[in-house]
Amino acid sequence: MEQRDRAREIIEFHFLSLKDAMGFLETAIKMKNDFEIDKKCKFKGLINYLTDECLAEIFSYLPPHEILQMKNVCKIWKEASDLAWPNVTRYIVKYPRNNFADKPLSVDTLKQVLKNCGIYLKRLELVSVCDSRIMPTIEKYCVNLERLVLLFKKFDSADFGGCFDLMVNLKYIKINGDMRYPHDLILGSLPVGLKEMHLFSSGRPNLVILNCPETIQKLIRLEKFTCRRMIIKSQTLSQFMMRESLTHLTMIMCDFGKEQVLSYSLPNLEHLEIDRCYNVHQTFLANVIYTSPNLIYLKIHKCNAFDAENLELICNLEKLEYLNFFGAGIVDDHVVAKITQNCRNLKTLYFPERKMITEAGYSHLGELDKLENLYVHGDDNESFNNHAMECIVKNFCNLKKLEINWSQYVLKYGLQDIGQLMHLCELELNHVLNLNDSILEYILLSCDKLKFLNISGCKLVTDEGLKQLFLLPHLTKLNVSEISNLTDDCFENITELKYLKCFGCCGITDVGIQKLLKNCPDLEFLDVDATGVTSKICIFAAQLTRLRQNNITLVIVTSSLIIENFKESEFYKTDNNEEEFKSPFLNLRSLHSIVK
């Protein structure tokens, strides 16, 4: 313990900061021998203060693959690096998406790291850095894992045979990729003590078939299960429906098949999410809800399995705190009344986007005195008008989040009523057609606790409306996408943002974004796709972010063409060859635009 304290003391009082210590190590890595360190490194004298244990403590702050390089510096550092491995209990490797990042790790380097620290690892995450051929190495060296995350582009079932047999402490596993092989072979050796299993597939070109009933049957302590884009065979689904230990069940874009499940027993289920799934039978949903009286979170999103019986069962879930039945076509005023009468613990409510809820339905909401988050989809619903907004404002003065999408019937005075919700922290007015500068200013004057504001698609808003954002001292997230009236002047008073989306704002150019980047040193995410910016903004961002002292990485989303032009620039070609000019805090991505 004294040696560890001594190591920290060295860092604090001699190196002045961890950053200086890391700078020392990076310099040492480049030196070929101890003589060069003595000659070129100003910190050389400090080595005399450090025992091997202290050096090992400092080395443990490095990424594990860099600890491998320590042994090449000198004999003392080789011995110290060997002592550093027991301190490495987690190893997270992701494929670098940063345009300035170093090349991805080789598989050989990865294997060397696992050989040295695998026995000590409790957590391992490998994301797009290798394929399933790494599994025998993990099986051999990483037997004490408690958490394992794998994203492989290529799977070979032969690599998984018995690979989890010795991982008796494994509690969490997440596998992402197209496992087009027998799942009992891939998952069959999972330990009985596993508590969480999350399986994700891209679903291209076809959904992956999940067929592993024997595996699910033996996981008697499984508490949380997630699957995405899979065809779940009836025998496998039946095992999940009888897993009494389950507390969280999430199925996204899955196909349940045509065969029905006959037995259900989910007494401890608290979280149920069925999102955009196919062939969900009405009796399936009814039985799950009926056998899960302790549900707290229920999301049945765009699912055709709703009928009167299902809605009746939902109305009886007294412990429910989160309810999302977006896409349910038969919700009317009567259903709303029953929900508000019985589900008195609701904190979050997502309304369906149908016309069957009238002003009378909205008036029932007053009974939900614990409601904090409300989502309403206006669409062409004439009943969601000024009166409905008045009901919401009147009954929910303590509302913390309000989201209104695609509304055209709430007029000026109805929108101004939002200003009475003085406790709002998040406000989303997405494509609310009647929102203009004066209404926005009125809202901002009253809702000064806002941290997130989304006014995307509000065509009447101009620069004048956004200039009032200085009234929001806590605002860190802003979405102004698809507002063609905005220009570079709209960012005049913005200084504390961490997240900005201005996708589709063609009037915003390099000038405005440069101003924003200067004024917001903590900015983490910026979407400028389909705007007036050019590749110059990438150069400016690289020059600016490389000077950041806060270690915050800026992610910029822009078009593929702009990124290609940036990579063809003289700046990038020079930067790419000279390490001292790289920016480790810039990440460029293209999500919206596809340029061939």
Image (tube, rainbow, N blue to C red):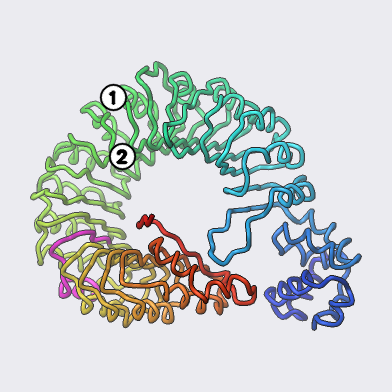
Q: Nearer the viewer, residue 213 or 111?
A: 111
Secondary structure of the residue carrying numbered label 2: strand
| Rendered position, 228 above or below 42 | above
Circle 1: residue type: Gln
> Which mark is on residue 185?
none
Q: Quadrant of residue 420?
A: bottom left
Q: Is residue 360 left or right of residue 347?
A: left
Q: x, y percentage for residue 55? A: 82, 67
Q: Quadrant of residue 71?
A: bottom right
Q: Which residue is under mark 2?
A: 301
Q: Earlier in the sequence, mark 1 or mark 2?
A: 1
User: Count the marks: how many?
Assistant: 2
Q: x, y percentage for residue 50? A: 86, 72
Secondary structure of the residue carrying numbered label 1: helix
- Picture quarter with the C terminus: bottom left
Segment tinted magenta in the rendering: 428-445
Q: Which residue is under mark 1?
A: 282
Q: Is residue 596 magenta?
A: no
- Picture quarter with the N terminus: bottom right
Of all residues, the one furthest to the right in this rendering is 75
Query: Label 1 vs label 2: CA separation?
Result: 14 Å
Q: Nearer the viewer, residue 311 or 507?
A: 507
Residue at left offset 58%, top offset 26%: 220
Residue 318 in view here: no
